Image (cartoon, rainbow, N blue to C red):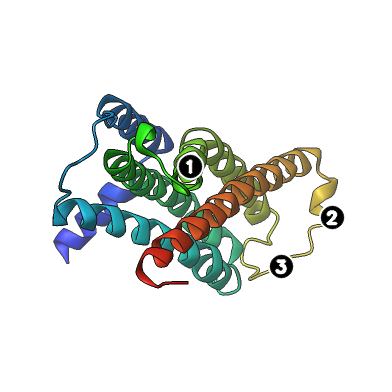
Amino acid sequence: MGNLSQVSSNFDALRMHHFQFFAVVVMVCFLSFFPSRRKLESPSVLHGMMHLGSFAANFGAQLWVTLVAGLTMFYSLPRHMFGKVQSKLFPMFFLWSLVCSSITLYTFLAQHPWDTWENGHLVQAVSLSICFVTAGLNSLVVSPLIVSAMLKTFKMEVDAGVGDVIGYADMKELKKNPQYFASYRKFRRCHGASAMLVVSSLVANTVYLYFLTSRCIPL
């Protein structure tokens, strides 16, 4: 129990700038070790495992967070608790997507340098690049804005006595407060932008999944 408590405390101590730093490190490492134009002659099993594993981990996390975890927490937790969980989940989820998408894109480019592309390779490369770029934008730009606005918004809701409401809450009276209205509007806009980036990445991953499947199952 002591070790679990220590791990929990260490995780809770992580701040947004820590996640941003990790995101920058991932992107710098990706650019520093950018695959050369030389195609791998005989890719190893480890190379294939890294490629498929990182893709599956990213795609699965996107589906879980978008369709399962977020909706379940929203309709099960009080608003202030939901906000606290999301303030930790968003940065970790976006960083996870960035790490996984960078590995998937790197291993793809290592096996398929741009001057060896055939039919379909351009679409696959663009799809994986979209996943990488959207994850980077969410990690470095959008996530800090969401968390900042969300924490400020939910704090004002707690002070107004509506922090324990589960699910949708009528905030008509609270929105008459200019500070709350501005914070809530900023949160909704940032959350909408982040959702669009995640959906774009999901669509791109689905396109790439089609190409992966077509290699295994004759269509």
Which mark is first along the chain, 1 or 2? 1
Which mark's residue is nearer the viewer, 3 or 1? 1
Amino acid, disc 3:
Tyr
Q: Earlier in the sequence, mark 2 or mark 3?
A: 3
Mark 1 nearby-residue class (10 Å; few <14, some 14–19, many ≥20): few
Quarter of the figure that contains the N terminus: bottom left
Could you tell which of marks 3 and 1 lies nearer the N-terminus?
Answer: 1
Q: Residue at horizontal 58%, vertical 69%?
A: 71
**Residue 78 drawn at (x, y percent):** 58, 67
- Along the line of sight, which residue is nearer the eye, 196 or 164? 196
Q: For this view, does 187 lie left or right of residue 137?
A: right
Where residue 168 is drawn, which disc sits there? 3
**CA separation in Å, label 2 and label 1:** 52 Å
In-image side of 100 versus 185 (left or right): left
Q: Which residue is mark 1?
A: 122
- Residue type at numbered disc 1: Leu
Which numbered tag is attached to residue 86? none
| Cα gap from disc 2 to disc 3, whole angstroms | 15 Å
Q: Secondary structure at mark 3?
A: loop
Nearest the camera: 151 or 105? 105
Mark 1 secondary-structure assignment: helix
Picture quadrant of residue 121: top left
Mark 2 residue crowding within 10 angstroms, few (<14) / some (14–19) / many (20+): few
Percent x, y for residue 49?
22, 58
Judge whether 64 appears above or below 155 on screen: below
Of 177 and 21, the residue lying toward us: 21
